[in-house]
Amino acid sequence: MKLLKRYSAIILLIVSIVLMSFSASFANEYAPGTYTVSVSCEGGAGRASLASSGVLYVEADGSMWVQVNWIKTNGNSGSTEFTYMIVNGVTYYPDYGQTFTVPVSALDTWITISAMTEAMSEPHLIDYSMCISSYGVPVASAPEPEPEPEPEPEPEANTNQNSNAQNSNEAAGTNADNDDSSAQNSEEAENEEQLEEDKSSEEAKAKEDETKKEEKKKDDKSSEKKSEEKTSEKKTSDEKNTDKKSDGDKKESATTSDTTTIGAIKTEAEAENKTMPLVIGGIIVCAIVGVIIYLFKSGKIGGESKNE
């Protein structure tokens, strides 16, 4: 039973956060604006409570804020001086007097809040539950779809105009047939002339190709002689370069061995630098877990809160 009492506050806080996360998706269904709403409050020692009405602000992005007032309950002569409120783990200070503006995750649902009072011998944090009614808050209407344009009626064609157009098309067709026959005869004569010209041009191209091939053969022979002379010169120069390369390879092998040793030293240093933060982080986490366990066992966290 003692464990249940100690962990009851933590369990209620977790449940409220889960419920608020599910109800947050419905915040965008209300129309933006300022509305007067009814407020319900439970909890505490019965000396102070929230006023039965408040002001709800719905933003364009769907977020909601409510302005509430703390009052004394009937027949109570105590003080309602609260220095700040805590909602969803965030601290909010008064706008003026005992009027606070705090966020609302959802309407028609109970939200866990806390208020700090200094009226007792020591400052004391008191837990309450608040519910904002959705009565009088309009729902945002979905945009109406645009009406589709009506199709325009097609104009009726006159029968007289259609008959005249057909007669003119038939006359044009006969004239076109006569023109096509004369055009075909002229095209055949032109095609014969082009064939004769193409034959003469092909014979001239063949003669030019033969002369170009003979010239290329002569040029190839002269280029072969030059290439043979160049290869002989390259052989002598390559023999000299091989001697120089052997000396350079020896120097490079010495430098590579030095760089490998330096790289090995750097990798060992980097490995040590990477492991140190992990070891330090593990020690810090273990220390934090130990402190939390000690606080739970000593009753400093999760214990019963004193009444106002």
Image: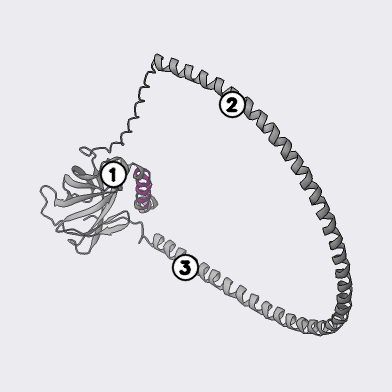
In the depicted view, which residue is nearer to us: 61 or 195?
A: 195
The stretch of residues the image draws in magenta is 10-23
Q: Earlier in the sequence, mark 3 or mark 2?
A: 2
Vertical position of residue 81 compared to residue 50: above or below:
below
- 166 over 251 or under it: above or below: above
Which residue is more in the foreground, 114 or 216?
A: 216
**Residue displayed at 59% across by 26% down:** 179
Q: How crowded is mark 1: few (under 14 residues within 10 Å), some or many (20 or more)?
A: many
The circle drawn on residue 274 is none
Residue 177 place in picture, x, y as percent: 59, 22
Mark 2 to mark 1: distance in Å?
A: 94 Å
> How much space separates mark 3 and mark 2, taking CA atoms?
106 Å
Residue 1 shows in the view:
no
Q: What residue type is labelled 3?
A: Ala
Q: Are marks 3 and 2 in contact (CB under 8 Å)?
A: no
Residue 307: tell me if it is visible.
yes
Q: Which residue in the structure is indicated by mark 3?
A: 287
The amino acid beneath tag 1 is Trp
The three-letter code of the residue at mark 2 reads Asp
Q: What secondary structure is found at the residue carrying circle 2? A: helix
> What separation in Å lies between label 1 and label 3 (alpha carbons)?
37 Å
The residue indicated by pointer 1 is: 110
Of the residues under marks 1 and 3, which one precedes in the sequence?
1
Q: Label 1: state its secondary structure.
A: strand
Q: In the visual, does 18 lie left or right of 197?
A: left
Name the residue: 55% across, 70% down. Answer: 279
Classify 10 Å Cα crowding around label 2: few (below 14), some (14-19), many (20 and above). Answer: few
- Lateral position of residue 169 relative to residue 2, left or right: right
Give the prevailing secondary structure in the magenta stretch. helix
Q: Which mark identifies residue 179?
A: 2
